[in-house]
Amino acid sequence: STWKLFIVPLSPLPLTSTPASRQLGIGILLMFIAAVTTVGNLLVLGALAWSREVLQGVTFSFIGSLAFADLIMGALVMPAGAAYILGGSWRLGELMCLLWNSVDVLSTTASIDTLCVIAMDRYVAITDPLRYQMHLTPKRARFLIAFVWFIAAMISFFPILMGWWRSDDPAACYADPDCCEYVSGKLYTAISSVIVFYMPLSIMVFVYSRVLKEAERQVSVLNSSQCLPSCCRSLPERRALKTLSLVMGVFIACWLPFFICYAIQIFCMTCVPGPLFLFLIWLSDTNSTFNPFLYSRSPEFMSAYKRILCCNSDEKHHGVGAPPRGRG
């Protein structure tokens, strides 16, 4: 996708001048990424609906919101972005350009901010499990999800459709119907990037560092306990540590390079080559591709996936662990 184009001036990179085989290969790769993103997040949403009696609770509500945001990215934003990049021009008109970029910013902001909410949810659940059950109710979880999407809408549709993001840069192609490039002013750039990335990143780093520290403490206590056999100590905790490490590692690897280059281009527009910046745009988008695989590694999700892929309708409304109905 190319929503990041509205942050810094960057011309689309048409690939029509490249060899046909290479252009075809790039197109297949981009569409493959979009397809994997779409299918992966559809599986998450399907598992939540299929086995709702097992995959329930506020954490699964947050994962559902995350999957929906990432599904929008894979199903709507990525294919249009791939077509724009490969064709070198925008063929759908100015209004669709505005809507496409608005949806792009919406899904990206909702995805990242939901990751932040999930981090805080895990922090409270691990560090204060008793209060977690009392304070983080399903009603409050729904409020948090609605708040995340409200913030995402306020940072995407309103500024873009109202034209508040526009700058006076003569390089902007606002009047060109074949161009869907966005060049924004520095103030809007700074505000949007803080809300979209830097604030969630700071919260996630702080929260997950505390979670990892607490989880390591619990692992140490369990390992020293004489109540459990040595073969059964700390297995779930170590799996949780591995999952948290993967979540943070993938998030930072996907998003931080782009925002570093973004910060550089505020002061030096020609310091980052266009092809490199375009690669970093798609690298950041692949966070939506990885999310369903990172947040649904539990046995409950795996069982739900098997039943969906095998079309086992007997357990659709009865949860993963429910006994099957008789055939009469």
Image (cartoon, rainbow, N blue to C red):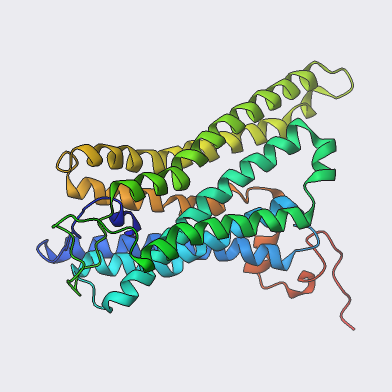
Look at the image and tell me whether residue 9 can be seen: yes
Which image quarter holds the N terminus?
bottom left
Which of 118/167 is in front?
A: 167
Quarter of image, res 135: top right
Which of 265/323 is in front?
A: 265
| Residue 197 in the figure: left or right of residue 131 | left
Look at the image and tell me whether residue 302 can be seen: no
| Residue 325 in the figure: left or right of residue 298 | right
Q: What residue lies at 13% left-to-right and 57% top-to-bottom?
A: 170
Q: Residue 209, percent across and down?
A: 59, 27
Quarter of image, res 221: top right
Quarter of image, res 20: bottom left
Q: Residue 145, percent across and down?
A: 64, 57
| Residue 272 in the figure: left or right of residue 5 | left
Q: Residue 325, percent across and down?
A: 87, 74
Which image quarter holds the C terminus?
bottom right
Q: Residue 100, percent across and down?
A: 37, 69
Which of 187/125 is in front?
A: 187
Outermost residue toward the bottom in this view:
328
Relative to 131, residue 49 above or below = below
Q: What residue lies at 43% left-to-right and 42% top-to-bottom?
A: 194
Please give the count of numbered marks on the rendered protein: 0
Q: What residue lies at 79% left-to-right and 29% top-to-bottom?
A: 232
Outermost residue toward the left in this view:
17
Which of 68/140 is in front?
A: 140
Q: What residue lies at 63% left-to-right and 51% top-to-bottom?
A: 296
